[in-house]
Image (cartoon, rainbow, N blue to C red):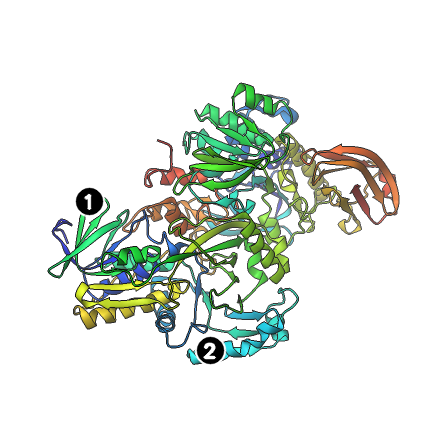
Amino acid sequence: MSSPEADRIHDIAIIGAGVVGCAVFREFVLAGRDCVLIERDADIISGASKANSAILHTGFDATPGTVEAACVRDGYRRYREIRERLNLPLLETGALVVAWNEEQRASLTGIVAQAHANGVSDVIEISAEAVRSREPGLGTGVYGGVWIPGEAVIDPWSAPLGYALQGVLNGGSLHRNTEIASGSLDRDIWALQTATGTTIRTHVVINCAGNYGDLVEAIARPSPFSITPRKGQFLVYDKPAYDLIHAIILPVPTSRTKGIVMTRTAYGNLLVGPTAEDQAERQIATVEDTTLEALAEAGRRMLPRLADVPITTAYAGLRPATEFKDYQIEALPARRWITIGGIRSTGLTGSLGIAKLALDLYVAHFGKLSPLDEPIWPRVPNLTEELPRPSAQPGRSEIICHCELVTRDEILSALDGPLAAGSIGGLRRRTRCMMGRCQGFYCSRRVLELAAAKIPGLLHA
Amino acid sequence: MRSVTIIGAGPAGLSAARVLVAAGLRDVLLLERNPEAGGLPRFCDHLGWGVLDLHRFWRGPRYARELVTRAAGAEIRTNTTVTAMAAGGSLHVSSPDGPAVIESRAVLIATGIRETPRGPRLVSGTRPWGVMTTGAFQEMAQARQIPFRSPVIIGTELVAFSAIMTARHAGISPVAMIEVNPRITARRPGDLIARHVFSVPVLTDTRLVTIKGVDRVEGIVVEQQGQRREITCDGIIFSGAFVPEAFLARASGLAIDPGSGGPVIDNFYRCSDPSYFAAGNILRPVEHSGMAAREGVLAAGAILQALGAGLPRPDAAIPVSIGGAMRYAYPQRLVLADDKPLGLFGRARIAHQGRLRVLCDDAVIASRPITILPERRLAITIAARDLVGRSAVSILLD
């Protein structure tokens, strides 16, 4: 562990610290391998994984027989197994696919059949009256629905944070601000060159590079897939909207997208989105006023009382879509390389299943495992309103962010430790500071007082 | 049980406390979620404060300190957050001592106001660091935390000029002010000050199209008379577009006026639950601190009456509705108590030229031609005799 990085040879280097990379990292560290997790950005969860709809999918609507279907099903089960030990949240909301016209209603039977084929046997079709009695807030024009009791809402940030933290605490290495520029395989050892000229050596590389997946894949071989990032824009409504629906409201999906979803968030808000817009740009996801207004209009149509609730903010994310519908996962034994690409909108759920699949591929092609006897299980700070927050505890430090009730100690703690926030976005995602209805009107100065010394670039030189 | 608890130690809350203490109440409690009392003027380090209520011409921090001093005799608990307001005046609070419930005969909500940040404005573009509201910027600049050197300022309300003054004080040079309307919102001489004293160009009839920059703000694209161009800047200050900080009231089930964004009150500053009163900028998008302070004083008077001889029953209130180009009017409910005239305030949604009419049921009691801008306050007085036996008041701007 103490040898200089240049001489050290890791068992496994994972490129990309999104939710998939974090889950794979955790899996291999707990399996006793020497792992390094490499992230080009200043913090983990900074690409595709930072913006999604935060749903724990049952996989009811997956294409039966696909890798995605298997990983989502397995990931779903494994999240439920480990989440209490990592203190990860779970809102058992269930989901309703709602048909808004006769044509959509006619397709509900097929959705139920597909769910059953995927092994999600508790999915049932329900009448328009039953939809209305479950969700009296929905607008007029409901033709029927499908009830999926197992769908749930989770926290898109604390989950990967927990995975990465468990990996680091159990001996894994994490390099942030580290972009892999090239690599060469020489006598079964990869030398990965970083953009700043350093070298990371490893026996096996796992490509979890998300929106950069095809570019990283080209280090090993001509990429068999190409990424066309698919942008999704979302609206977040203020907390009074939380009670307007109970279940996740899903549209009847098309072949290209799951469509615009309405869901509660783990933080007590309501989310409307995403859109699905293909673009060439891999890093920047802009929001567009006309699209956001159309989203708001769609939200009001489905849930009329949304018109009375202020919008808190809007955001956009990029999902790494490829020309293939399924995940692109395979081992390249001769190249000592595992490819994990094209993980689109189901990555948050699928990640733990993908990690297990990667472990199986490793054992099949590359080496043995020596699972840790007693791994450390960190407890991730709770950000949800379902469990007690530090702001409600006696002896609490002062509340810095009044909208999200974030205390000074929570912010200081997120700025410290083995996985300290590396960017202001990372701090926001770890604590929710500046994420509420005032978006930093009341707390920016005080957050900066705490963060400016730790996170570079916040103040003008 | 306490007599009065006040939520928010800004100009309205502190002014109310001063009056309540002066009237002899010994158990007035002020709850302030921040580490110090004084409210937003604490961060507005330029002259112009205290004119209307204290007849002084002070800097904001001095004004805030003076309000706190004059409220001596009231207990101020800082670092104390109200998390819920239950029926009948019972407040759930969080403090370093842990969660607690405070019961009072009357509660005054004086939680003030904030600006609309970028998010709900649905502005296109990237989401880099360096985008903030005037309020956040003023606090940072005063603490000598300088997030940028050459920002643009979006909006031309009074607070935007306050931002320019703060910016210059901190060695920051705004590159432009952007106003979507054909004229600036603040009264003259705001634009003249901007142009001639601070040399900040004011671009009217100009729309912010897109924000650019990945990690930090790199520029904006604006559109003026169909022409788009880029302005290089390293920060964006969204100024104005104030909204009452009324989340607690909304979440607690008090009636909210969708027009003002604040709680529905009657002419005694009473909310829909008569244990709760509201005063200051929570009542509507921003007025200057002097008016907020004055409302604090008046609400304190009403609370004293409620605790003493009693106020007229709220259920006899006459509702006030609005129509045409009106955006809001308050009080939203009128309770006849004596023969004093009743004062209402309101604003128009848009710049409007037409006729203002006040109807009591079907009777037109006032009708006059009017030219009004949306940012200008509209004052209406109704004689008590016009309300006798009436069941509805309408304020129409046609």
Residue A124 at least partly seen: yes
Image coords of residue A344 (percent x, y): 39, 62
- Front-most of A362 and B207? B207
Horizontal relation, residue A394 to residue B77: left or right: left
Q: Secondary structure at mark 1?
A: loop
Residue B103 at least partly seen: no
Image quarter where the C terminus of chain B lies is top right
The image quarter in which residue A19 lies: bottom left
- Front-most of A403 and A11? A11
Residue at (46, 78) in percent of width and height: A114
- Front-most of B123 and B157? B123
Q: Residues within 10 Å of mark 1 (few under 14, many from 20)?
A: few
| Mark 1 vs 2, N-terminal side | 2
Instruction: Give the letter of the chain under mark 2.
Output: A
Name the amino acid, label 2. Answer: Gln
Q: Which mark is residue A114?
A: 2
Residues tagged by mark 1 and mark 2 found on one chain of the structure: yes
In the rendered image, the residue lying farthest to the top is B197
Circles 1 and 2, Cβ within 8 Å, touching? The answer is no
Residue at (40, 43) in percent of width and height: B214
Instruction: Give the letter of the chain under mark 1.
Output: A
Q: Residues within 10 Å of mark 2 (few under 14, many from 20)?
A: many
Image coords of residue A393 (percent x, y): 43, 53
Image coords of residue A70 (percent x, y): 36, 74
Q: Which mark is residue B268?
A: none
Residue, disc 1: A197
Q: Secondary structure at mark 2?
A: helix
